[in-house]
Amino acid sequence: MNDTKSKARTVNATIGKQPNIGPFPADQLIPWVVISGLSYYLFHGFLRLNWVWTLALAIWGMSTWWVLTANGAWRILSKFLATPNWTRVRTLYQPILQPNTRKKGRKQKDRSRT
């Protein structure tokens, strides 16, 4: 009985890894199909470009999508985000809704000359 506990367990090496279709991530398949279809419709069907331009623009769109959405894209894209500047300021609290009341003990001087 102690023999089974002391033996090393076999572990599935694919647990926790992302599924791939060849060298490409599997979660990119559906967006790439959509990008390819839009490229065909827009560039080959609507604008009447030849296949070289249509294929080049489809590959450009798919590679852009891959860079923007792939794992670790935050490492590249986070460099373009501005970090906040924090400043501490102390000021006297003055309520906004309280009416401006003057003290009754003081008299205002009349500065008008007659």
Image (cartoon, grey):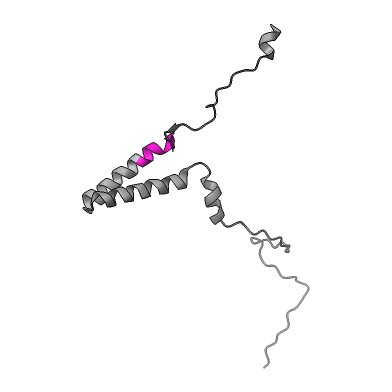
Q: Nearer the viewer, residue 87 or 75?
A: 75
Counting from the top left corner in percent of width and height, residue 41 is at: 25, 47
What residue is drawn where x is 70% and y is 85%? 110
Counting from the top left corner in percent of width and height, residue 89 is at: 71, 62
Q: Nearer the viewer, residue 63 or 82?
A: 63
Can you say whether 59 is above or below 3 in the image? below
What residue is drawn where x is 42% and y is 46%? 65
Extreme residue in the top direction: 1
Identify the image quadrant of residue 107: bottom right
Q: Is residue 35 left or right of residue 114?
A: left
Can you say whether 38 is above or below 8 in the image? below
Residue range in magenta is 23-32
What residue is drawn where x is 70% and y is 87%? 111
Q: Say how many tags the image has.
A: 0
What residue is drawn where x is 51% and y is 41%? 71
Q: Nearer the viewer, residue 82 or 63?
A: 63
Looking at the figure, which quarter contains the C terminus?
bottom right
Counting from the top left corner in percent of width and height, residue 47 is at: 23, 54
Counting from the top left corner in percent of width and height, residue 32 is at: 36, 41
Looking at the figure, which quarter contains the N terminus?
top right
Q: Is residue 105 left or right of residue 17?
A: right
Can you say whether 50 is above or below 111 in the image? above
Identify the image quadrant of residue 98: bottom right
